[in-house]
């Protein structure tokens, strides 16, 4: 996005810092999400600091959210302090995102995972917040206890746990 005098930015765009994998990562993410696309690729010029012609940034879109992947070098890496939540309507959708994003990465607890680039994701069925905020505190606590015992979230198991009496 080029800003000129008097232009205001209307969105917040996450910028993801990679060593040299920005283009690979953007291609991977756009292959995982439907309606995703690469928007733009910019390259380092003669002024550097990267080698002229190599990828500097890749702008891409996932589910209507724009991201920028930056090849900034090895100085910074991802941590769990920042993650992206993926809301899923069905167990099939949870399973598909979990499988795709965790491949080559690391599965974590409670629907969290790190992908092969070290970026953290939360694969969350839309029913989870509903169950956790149920007006019946016993029901919500049973759902919480069930979630805390899971890696990938299992919707049927959450519903079963919440419904127990």
Image (cartoon, rainbow, N blue to C red):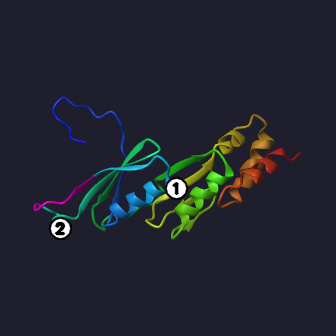
Q: Residue at x 49, y 53 (%)?
A: 83
Instruction: Give the farthest residue toward the right.
Output: 165
The dot on residue 51 is: 2
Q: Is residue 44 magenta?
A: yes
- In the displayed structure, does residue 148 sit left or right of residue 165? left
Viewer-proximal residue among 70 and 135:
70
Instruction: Give the farthest residue toward the bottom.
Output: 104
- In the displayed structure, does residue 62 sit left or right of residue 155? left
Residue denoted by label 1 = 121
From the image, state whether disc 2 or disc 1 is nearer to you: 2
- In the displayed structure, does residue 130 sit left or right of residue 44? right
- In the displayed structure, does residue 19 sit left or right of residue 99? left
- CB atoms at circles 2 and 1 under 8 Å apart? no
Q: Secondary structure at mark 2?
A: loop
Q: Residue at x 22, y 31 (%)?
A: 7
- The stretch in magenta equals 41-47
Number of numbered discs overlaid on the protein picture = 2
Count neighbours of disc 2 (C-alpha within 10 A) and say few if under 14, some if 14 to 19, many if 20 or more.
few
Count neighbours of disc 1 (C-alpha within 10 A) and say few if under 14, some if 14 to 19, many if 20 or more.
many
Q: CA distance from mark 2 to mark 1?
A: 31 Å
Q: Secondary structure at mark 1?
A: strand
Q: Residue at x 10, y 60 (%)?
A: 47
> Residue 161, percent across and down?
80, 50
> Residue 132, percent across and down?
70, 43
For residue 143, above or below residue 120: above
Q: First in sequence, mark 2 or 1: give its number.
A: 2
> Residue 32, percent across and down?
49, 56
Q: Is residue 138 magenta?
A: no
> Residue 60, percent across and down?
36, 50
């Amino acid at each position: 996005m080029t800003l000129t005098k008097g232009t205001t930015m209307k969105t917040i765009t996450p910028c993801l810092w990679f060593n040299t994998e920005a283009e690979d990562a953007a291609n991977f993410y756009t292959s995982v999400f439907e309606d995703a696309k690469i928007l733009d690729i910019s390259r380092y010029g003669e002024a550097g600091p990267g080698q002229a012609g190599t990828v500097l940034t890749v702008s891409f879109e996932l589910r209507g959210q724009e991201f920028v992947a930056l090849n900034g070098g090895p100085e910074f890496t991802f941590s769990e302090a920042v993650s992206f939540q993926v809301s899923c309507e069905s167990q099939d959708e949870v399973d598909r995102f979990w499988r795709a994003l965790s491949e080559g990465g690391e599965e974590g607890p409670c629907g969290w995972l790190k992908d092969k680039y070290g970026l953290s994701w939360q694969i969350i069925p839309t029913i989870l917040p509903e169950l956790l905020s149920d007006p019946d505190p016993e029901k919500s606590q049973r759902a919480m206890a069930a979630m805390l015992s899971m890696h990938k979230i299992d919707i049927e198991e959450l519903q079963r746990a919440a419904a127990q009496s």
